[in-house]
Amino acid sequence: MATPTLDFNCELKATGDDGTFEGYGSVFNITDFGGDIVVPGAFADTLAAQKAVGRLPAMLWQHRPSEPIGVYTSMEEDSVGLKVKGKLALKTARGAEAYELMKMGALSGMSIGYKSRDDSYDRVTGKRTLKKLDLLELSLVTFPMNDASRVSSVKSIEGLETLRDVEDYLRESGLSRSAALALIARVKSLGQSDSGSGDMQQIVEALGRRGVVFAS
């Protein structure tokens, strides 16, 4: 089963030529496009456990396990969210690339990979509150899920004919496969679409109402 992810448009600040940076890996009390909300205290237990063994979650490029790009040197919760400091591996191709893009402002997103230990779902609002999480990794990403207005696409609405087309579109927009599938499933579960010939168009329209921008 794929690891769930949550994406955030966070300000990443490059602080020196040694590849160090800081920012927020998660922001509390913000509803993402999938209807999930992380609340204060969600990371307290997992951070305590990881610090006890002297290890922090992995720093990955776009959630790719085969592409670590550095290490995190500090993680803590504050009133805003999960505040992190890290150092990119500048002698690796991907680490150097990430740092140059970060300094230019072309790379500004972070996304957590996690397992939920405690959460609740409100059937009226369609929102899930994440109360306790096991933090597995924290990736640098190009297009975080809650910043879809920055996405430009080469596909048009007319070109989306299957569920896989919508999934591929969202992945090209910066969402992981699990996040794309979760977003589609959530829209369908809310009754925005029924099985039938108009299913894909209704999903597209519903995603558009949720802030996902499609080129036309």
Image: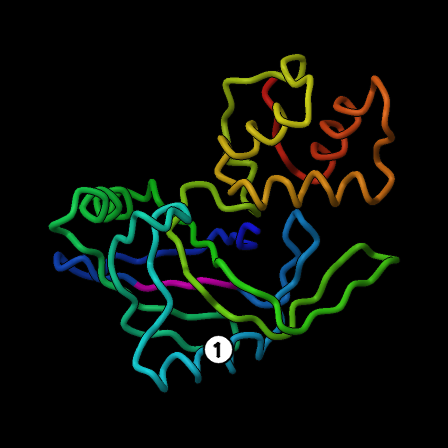
Q: Quadrant location of residue 62? A: top left
Q: State the image coordinates of residue 98 (x, y, percent, origin top left).
A: 26, 46
Q: State the image coordinates of residue 119 (x, y, percent, origin top left).
A: 70, 69
For residue 160, above or below residue 111: above
Q: Is residue 112 left or right of residue 22?
A: right
Q: Quadrant location of residue 193? A: top right
Q: State the image coordinates of residue 112 (x, y, percent, origin top left).
A: 48, 58
Q: Residue furthest front?
A: 1
Q: Is residue 175 left or right of residue 76?
A: right
- What residue did someone put label 1 on? 46
192 drawn magenta: no
Secondary structure at numbered mark 1 = helix
Q: State the image coordinates of residue 91 (x, y, percent, origin top left).
A: 11, 50
Q: Quadrant location of residue 142? A: top left
Q: Nearer the viewer, residue 134 or 187?
A: 134
User: Which residue is painted at 57% across and 45% down in the image?
Assistant: 178
Residue type at numbered disc 1: Thr
Which stretch appears magenta?
Answer: 22-26
Q: Nearer the viewer, residue 2 or 30?
A: 2
Chief SS of the magenta region: strand
For residue 176, above or below residue 57: above
User: Which residue is painted at 35% across and 44% down in the image?
Assistant: 107
